Amino acid sequence: IVVYGITNDTEEHIKTTLISDKIQTALNETGAVEFVDKAARMAIEQEIGSQGGRVDPATATQMGKQLGATHVLLGTLASMDSQQGKGIRLSKKSLKFYNLTVRLTNTETGKLDFSGEFEVAREESQPLIGW
């Protein structure tokens, strides 16, 4: 599997790399899947390219021996607000719902092999009178 990340479709600045890293770590710990590191792959290509003529040919790394990813992991993080009803109160409360959709697509066939949704709610409170 290669992780292409989570798209942030919220209006907030959320580090979605943290979410995709947590998903990758959790799946990796099961031992059921293997991952290809997209960021490391670019660095490895650069390193192999820089070895030409500078490294003993007997110890030089060869291109074409890396694993290919059979699946791509992508996702989307979206949010939705739910305001509290009208009335007299000292603070403005709202619920913010976050929805994370994760997709696992086969790189050879393009077939969507897995799609899952995860939702979490968070209460936000702001005073009506600032002090």
Image (tube, rainbow, N blue to C red):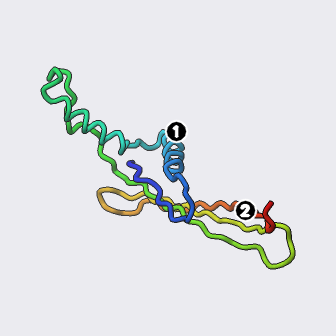
Residue 70 percent across, percent down from the top left: 34, 50
Q: Is residue 105 left or right of residue 64?
A: right
Q: Is residue 52 left or right of residue 106?
A: left
- Please name the residue shown 31% across and 41% down the image: 41
- Please name the residue shown 75% across and 64% down the image: 126
Q: Is residue 93 left or right of residue 32?
A: right
Q: Provide the residue designation for mark 2.
A: 124
Work out whether residue 119 or residue 82 is closer to the camera in this orientation and state it.
82
Where, quadrant-wise, is the C terminus in this rendering? bottom right
Q: CA distance from mark 1 to mark 2?
A: 34 Å
Which numbered disc covers residue 29? 1
Element marked by disc 2: strand
Instruction: Name the N-terminal-most of marks 1 and 2.
Output: 1
- Please name the residue shown 19% across and 29% down the image: 51
Q: Amino acid at mark 2?
A: Glu
Compared with 72, 43 (above or below) is above
Compared with 126, 50 (above or below) is above
Q: Residues within 10 Å of mark 1 (few under 14, many from 20)?
A: few
Residue 73 percent across, percent down from the top left: 42, 54
- The mark closer to the camera, 1 or 2, is 2
| Count of picture labels | 2
Residue 82 percent across, percent down from the top left: 69, 72
Element marked by disc 1: helix
Residues marked 1 and 2 touching at CB (< 8 Å): no
Compared with 24, 97 (above or below) is below
Residue 7 percent across, percent down from the top left: 47, 60
Q: Is residue 86 left or right of residue 49?
A: right
**Residue 42 found in image quarter:** top left
Q: Residues within 10 Å of mark 2 (few under 14, many from 20)?
A: few
